[in-house]
Amino acid sequence: MGRGLVPNASRPELVVVFVDTSTWIDYFRGKETVETLYLSDLVAEDADICVSGIILTEILQGIPADKEHKKVSGYLNDLIFLPMSKSSYFLSADIYREAKAHGHVIRSTTDCLISACAIEHSVSLLQNDKDYLTIEKFSPLKLIELDVR
């Protein structure tokens, strides 16, 4: 994948975009949401799109047909891969604990892990899961904000 985004007046210029599992699933199913339309633009512009191991696993484990699994695997294999270190797991736990200390329970450990990965690699996250809105309030996570007029 790509060399960065071509500037576009309808959205901010981004260099690297980390895409969450739920957005990928909607994208591969052909569901039109503001996030999947944005992702389609990123793909068309040959933008630098990245994934992590946990996102790869979540996407691929849900594809029952071998032909589709092979096609999606090949596509995802060409994306930028963001590794996670031991510190990512400590940060993930800290994210969960910080939100909980403020009276918010994050429903998914996976969302904390994905957030930690985004924070450690200094990339913005494209997502459509309300847990990330909570995580963003109590951590340095940067979400891509899309106009949903």
Image: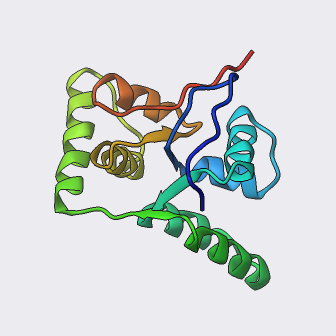
Quadrant of the frame with the N terminus: bottom right
Q: Quadrant of residue 69?
A: bottom right
Q: Residue at x 39, y 50 (%)?
A: 114
In this image, 86 relative to 124: left or right? Answer: left
Quadrant of the frame with the C terminus: top right
Q: Position of residue 17 (x, y in %)?
A: 51, 45
Which residue occupies the foreground of this view, 5 or 96? Answer: 5
Q: Residue at x 81, y 40 (%)?
A: 32
Q: Quadrant of residue 115?
A: top left
Q: Quadrant of residue 142?
A: top left
Q: Position of residue 21 (x, y in %)?
A: 56, 53
In this image, 64 relative to 134: left or right? Answer: right
Question: Looking at the picture, does residue 128 appear above or below residue 104?
Answer: below
* Colour treatment of the image: rainbow
Q: Residue at x 58, y 71 (%)?
A: 78
Q: Position of residue 59 (x, y in %)?
A: 59, 64
Question: Looking at the picture, does residue 34 appear above or below residue 103?
Answer: below
Question: Looking at the picture, does residue 79 appear above or below residue 122?
Answer: below
Q: Position of residue 26 (x, y in %)?
A: 72, 50
Question: Looking at the picture, does residue 109 appear above or below residue 106?
Answer: below
- Count the marks: 0
